[in-house]
Image (cartoon, rainbow, N blue to C red):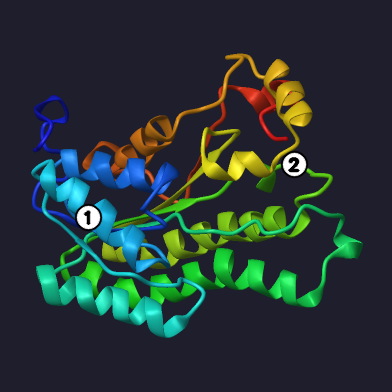
Amino acid sequence: MTDTANGGALAGKVAIVTGSTRGIGRATAEAFARAGAKVVISSRKPEACEAARAEMAAAGHEVISVPAHVGKGEDITRLVDATIEAFGRLDVVVCNAAVNPVFAELQDITEDTWAKVMDTNLTSVWRMSKAAFPHIARQGGGAMVLLSSTASLVGTVTEGPYAVSKAAENHLARQLAVQWGPKNIRVNTIAPGLTRTDMIRNHDPAMVARALERTPLRRMGEPSEVAAVALFFASDASRHLTGQLLVADGGGLLLGGGSA
């Protein structure tokens, strides 16, 4: 059901959210649905997509699921085509799906791992932009929201490929913002810090504890808190913002914390 507290900020809009069966992506899909959007759930696993769709549909939301691997160009094309077939339009894309498969120093990373991270975290966003642009432009404008990381803004000990891919994604957003602005399409980026998702399980607990000690709010973020920022960027509340990066990390970067 639409949340009247936000006035149906996305009423009548159609949104794709990648990586939306859990974590930040799932929270974002739910926030968009409550704001009145028709939402397309997508991740690699069909059964996870269907489970998320069923739960959201049971809550009264208009939602479909389209399994897709964002690292495959043909899957991205199919995802966008299925959205248009189901709803006839596309207004918002949230590029949330990403991988961080290895924690090691750069000299120990294989070329295959490097290529996988770049293809999934960066090239996929470029491919999505190419597929989505004509449909969003046809509506007279819309928004693209990219999920980056505070790791993109600092040096990290063992997250090199992931951090580099996210730093490049930050600038991809700026490039798209410049090129798409005349079509009234806004592109903005969120850089979460430590957030309570499955990915956090791969971090050394001692490193996480030290990072939180250097975070002014002294806690991790919640997926719903990042989703609230995504909703802001997707809605008319941010209609004069594009090419911006908003750090959502509890103030961690202020004191050198927020990223393990």
Q: Position of residue 155 (x, y in %)?
A: 80, 44
Q: Residue at x 21, y 76 (%)?
A: 82
Q: Is residue 155 left or right of residue 69?
A: right
Question: Which quadrant is home to the N terminus?
Answer: top left
Q: Nearer the viewer, residue 20 or 185?
A: 20
Q: Of all residues shown, which one is farthest toward the bottom?
A: 74
The residue labelled by disc 1 is 53
Question: Where, by quadrant of the figure, is residue 161 drawn?
Answer: bottom right
Q: Secondary structure at mark 2?
A: loop
Residue density around tag 1, few if under 14, some if 14–19, many if 20 or more, within 10 Å: many
Q: Nearer the viewer, residue 232 or 86?
A: 86
Considering only vertical position in the picture, is 184 above or below 35?
below
> Of the residues tagged 2 and 1, which is closer to the observer?
1
Q: Secondary structure at mark 1?
A: helix
Q: Nearer the viewer, residue 131 or 121?
A: 121
Q: Residue at x 26, y 60 (%)?
A: 50
